[in-house]
Amino acid sequence: MNTSDTPTMNDYYRLDISIKPASTDACDLAADSLAAIGFESFEQPEEAGGASMTAYVPAPLFDAEAAREALAEIEPLAVADFEAVFVKGRDWNSEWEKNYFKPILVAGRVAVHSSFHTDVPPAEFDIVIDPKMAFGTGHHATTTLMMKALLSGNIAGASVIDMGTGTGILAILASMLGAAEVAAVEIDPFAAANAADNVALNLGNGYEVEVLEGDESALGNIEFKADVFLANINRNVITADIEAYAAALKKGGRLVVSGFYVADREIVAEAAARAGFDADGVDEFDGWSSMQFVKR
């Protein structure tokens, strides 16, 4: 990096993080702590078994000392060390097209692709996701699980809240499935802007989708109680905020959560029970889990 250059929000720092002893729980805690100081994307290679992870933050937000303090919060469960690598801004759409983001077909019914793709499989529902940042196209096992839950649920006419919407993909699908109204909440301002762009790209007149920037406190700004509440985030955020999710749901409303491993189900189920939910089904894919609950 040329130190005379001023970093932009299109530039990133990548943190290559080692975790000792190896612990997927420690990786999850590290992601939570780093997200609180502006990190927006995390990768946990399954083959690493919790021994390493990668985190990305827009370059202007990077503070090495703040990152060290955030990672220290996982002690005494584990100790984290990192190497920071500057990643110069580039045409991220082109990068995704060449290296990562390929069209997919979910449950044989939903095609997910970007506007630059031409090899798109025909499907009942066609969703266009154009990533405006380095990461976050919705291609993940947990996204597939959440989409399957939407496809199998009774969404027509329902009021839906999508917490941690990311690219907006679940909110978009809920609208396509006939939801009467949808609110999508995203803590990261750049992801929220991207979600709003993707909503506009996919949904024409007659669809009701509101994108709100904020954490769980933003739920108080939504004018309706939800019939269906979606949260594809991570175990620690879900268990910490699940009472706020319950408050945003109607009695008898359905909570669908993912973003955690199969091994974490008991922890999530216990938190849900304390918040007034009854278990109503589980699913899994590639070691990841989704769970559904009904508000008592």
Image (cartoon, helix red, strand yellow):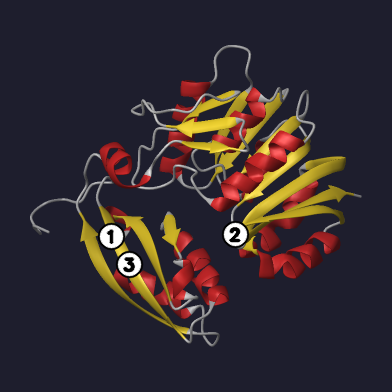
Crowd tier of the residue under label 2, counting other residues whose Cα lies within 10 Å: few below 14, some 14–19, many 20 or above:
some
Q: Secondary structure at mark 1?
A: strand
Determine whether 270 is above or below 113 in the image. below
Q: Is 272 located above or below residue 111 in the figure?
A: below
- For label 1, the residue is 13
Within 10 Å of disc 3 (Cα), the crowding (few <14, some 14-19, many 20+) is: many
Disc 3 versus disc 2: distance between alpha carbons? 19 Å
Tell which of 217 and 125 is nearer to you: 125
Q: Position of residue 76 (x, y in %)?
A: 54, 88
Name the residue rendered at 44%, 60% in the picture: 42
Does the CB distance between marks 1 and 2 fall below 8 Å? no
Nearest the eye: 132 or 43:
43
Check disc 1 and give the amino acid type. Tyr
Q: Quadrant of residue 268?
A: bottom right
Q: Which residue is mark 3?
A: 15
Q: Secondary structure at mark 3?
A: strand
Q: Quadrant of the N terminus?
A: bottom left
The outermost residue toward the top is 205
